[in-house]
Amino acid sequence: MSREFSDLGRQAVEEQRVSQLPQSRIPRYHLRPLPSRVRNGVRSNRAFEGLRRVSNRPVQQVTRNPVPEGIPYRSPHGRQSTESRAELNLEGSERLCERVDRQGVRNPVLERPPGLKPYSGHTSETRAEFTFRVLGRAERQPQLAIRNPVLEGFPYQSSPGSQSTEFGSESAIMVGKKSGKALLREEGLARTDNGMKMTSWPEVSMINQKNYYTDYMKRDDQILPIRLQTEANRDRMIRDAKDRDRALARTGTTEVPLPLPAEGEPDEDSTSTSYSTDASKLIVIHPGSQNLRIGFASDALPKTIPSALAVKSKSTESEECEPAPARLKMSGSPEDKFGEEFSKKYTKLSSELKVEMRANKFKVLPNSKELVVNYNRRAVPDVIQEHNDPFRVEWTDVSKDDESMASYFAGMEALRIPENSKPPYRIFRPLQLGVFHEKDYTSSDALLDDFEATIESALRKELGLTSSTSWAQYSCVVVIPDLYDKRYVQEILHICLKSIEFKQVCFIQESLAATYGAGYTSACIVDVGAQKTSICCVEEGMCVEDSRINLKYGGYDVTETFIKMMLYDYFPYADINLNRRYDFLLAEELKINHCTMNLAKIAVQLCDFHLRAPNQDTRKYQFKTYDEPILAPKGFFDPSIFNNSGKLEGRRSLIERSYNAYDTETPDDPTSTAQTAILTSIKPSLVTTATGLSSNVNGNAEFATPSKEKPNPLNIVARMDSEANGGSRVTSAAASPAPEGTNTPVQSGLSVSGVNGVNGGSPGPSGNVFAFGGSHNGGTPAPAGMFVDQQARTAKDLAIERDSVLPIAPLDAAIITSITHAAKGDEKKVRDFLGGIMVIGGGAKTPGFVPFLEEKLKSKRPDLAEKILVGTSPREMDGQVVVWKGASVFARMTSHECWIGPLEYERLGSRVLYTKVLWNY
């Protein structure tokens, strides 16, 4: 006890000694000694034990760190002592700071980093916390070159000639450590990343070594849609078994009469789906650019409704848009109205027709064109009073509409709204060219809402389903294009299941539905629509992916070109405008009544029509035609006569393309080699190995030896403007200078010519559309943009470049291109597809179109002329409804499992399409 009190007395003496020191002698960064633990005036034994160890330690073992332990120093009397820690901290810290400065050693405890407050004994922060805060601050400031003496050990020189590896608490010399990157940079081994790939080969991702040997997500019973389908089939089997047991209990005999299917009702086996197959509960929808076809699967024919929606607006579409056909001037001569280019093309086609008619022994009058022009100039309309017109039109009464801006008219009601109605209405078309029409809309929501409103209006007014609550009882089959956009399919799926809330939905492609409707298993389907023409080969109930072609022209282009040619020959109704509603209906009627492709009917003919406009008397016009009815449909085989400007305007402005779920920079919209061949014939720079296509259809390319061109039945000579430019058919691929104004020699093989008027009549690449290399057949300079750095363009860049090209090609060349890519070198398949070409669609209803197309194909493949057969839909079925009829047949089949329900879509979203559609989505 006496020793404890003596120590307390010594502590009091130390504190008094500190208080008597002048301010200059007290260190600026003085650290308090360890706080003593006093309980009722008695110091803890642990504190005394620590002081005893310090005081008893030999001089040579005392460390250099003044904080945890005492430091030896010389007393004023010249003797060496090991005083207590408190004395060292009070008197020795100043000398230690001088010694540290003299030796060049930085101490993170005694030296304060910038911005750090000194330790104060009056704060709640203990000395250990303050020390670690200093060390942490020192570590965050590399410019101080402070090493953490607590966390790591490093060698230091304790005395001359001796080295130690004590830990930081016992170290006095702290040297900054360089990072690994700094060392590599000094040694010259640091990597300089220049953005270049190590190899041009495709990189294969590593296999998950943890799960690659398991069967997770590799069996059908682990996929949600298939699992739900299996559960539904099992529930159906249980329900049938219970029904059979109840029937046995009622009859009391072991013989249960099996119910026989009704006449015409399909047989159902035990493995069929549990979904309802009642045809009256199945709705088939075929959206189109100009018309929407909808009906029950039990109906013989669908309801055809114009794909138009009229909403209130400040002005009509005829006031906001330029007149169609496009005119340079509204008055003057035909050359002034339509330009010199159209005048040359029209004159050229007229001359070719006369040559063709003379070759086929048809009489050609030399002054036929003058007779037509002179008569049309003097034609004056006859006015018929409206009450005397038996075929007067019932216009839509907009006064019955409510006052809200959300009201609209759809279908034929929209086209029958007067142009001068109060308030004005504007026509919107959600679909154009087979895709969503983004040009006339400012947001994607408005576009999708109009598309949904068109379908809802058809359900209410055409099918009689006025109550939206009953729609949940109906299943829906939607027909989509062969070469579709994934976003288009996904948006339709969302509208059907979330907005309209059908019971279930499934999809089918147009060409496949056409084969169902016609009863064919294999065929080459040519669907000529209003604004697009699709070609696809179907083999054994599946669309051949590489044969799909989508061309952006159709029946509407024929209508516009026919009216344009008539205006060129002084059509009496000179103010016709296809953007005006009643004029558009009149132009469609004129095309249906007068256009033909039969040479025997080409003569000067007198025709008439009645113009019925709202709030006006009916006017009867008489006019004459000569070659206009056949030259307009010939645009399918020479599309340069069509007006192809503005068709891609607004594309991808509202709805972005689809991208891969695992690589957000890779577009995953479906493509085909046949479509790529059409695009590369227009823009050769698309031909790169980055597209993933082979350099040749047959796998070999011949460029080397100049020789006489071998006759090839697949050679389709592009003759767009060659005759006008003085060019002739080239028969040699040898290296020779090409004269000015002539065409560039091309390879033998399949060739698709560009028809946008850009190439100036030069034939496109041949069947080797993917092999642009070597000498390019004799030193002729390659087209601009052909050789592009493949690494500089990503998949996204190629997709953007591909979307910027309008796919246009002669119909006969496109058909042979599709068949060639579908057969893939198999001559038997080529003969089969050429012998089974089926032409459908409203654009192909022109009289004489099918025989004319067959003759064109025979001239391209004379070696298979006997095998080529082009036909229409069988059983005299209307070509416009074959696709819808096939979809209704598909909807009533019980063997397929393509139905998508709300539960699957809610859990998986659009990913459910990968396991539900018939093709490789």
Image (cartoon, grey):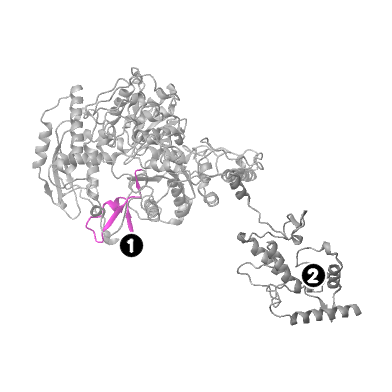
Q: Secondary structure at mark 1?
A: loop
Q: Is residue 820 left or right of residue 306?
A: right
**Residue 8 place in picture, x, y as percent:** 84, 79
In which quarter of the view is residue 724 placed?
Answer: top left
Q: Residue at x 10, y 42 (%)?
A: 379
Task: From the image, tell me which residue sits under label 1.
Answer: 405
In which quarter of the view is residue 772 placed?
Answer: top left
**Residue 893 place in picture, x, y as percent:** 49, 39
Q: Is residue 419 above or below residue 771?
A: below
Q: Residue at x 16, y 31 (%)?
A: 603
First along the sequence among labels 2 and 1 = 2
Residue 220 visible: yes
Dot 2, how many residues are within 10 Å of its Cα: few (below 14), some (14-19), or many (20+)? few
Magenta part of the protein: which range? 406-433
The residue nearer to you, when weighing 481 against 391, is 481
- CA–CA distance in space, label 2 to label 1: 99 Å
Tell me the amino acid under the disc marked 1.
Met
Tell me the amino acid under the disc marked 2.
Arg
Q: Is residue 430 magenta?
A: yes
Task: From the image, tell me which residue sits under label 2.
Answer: 74
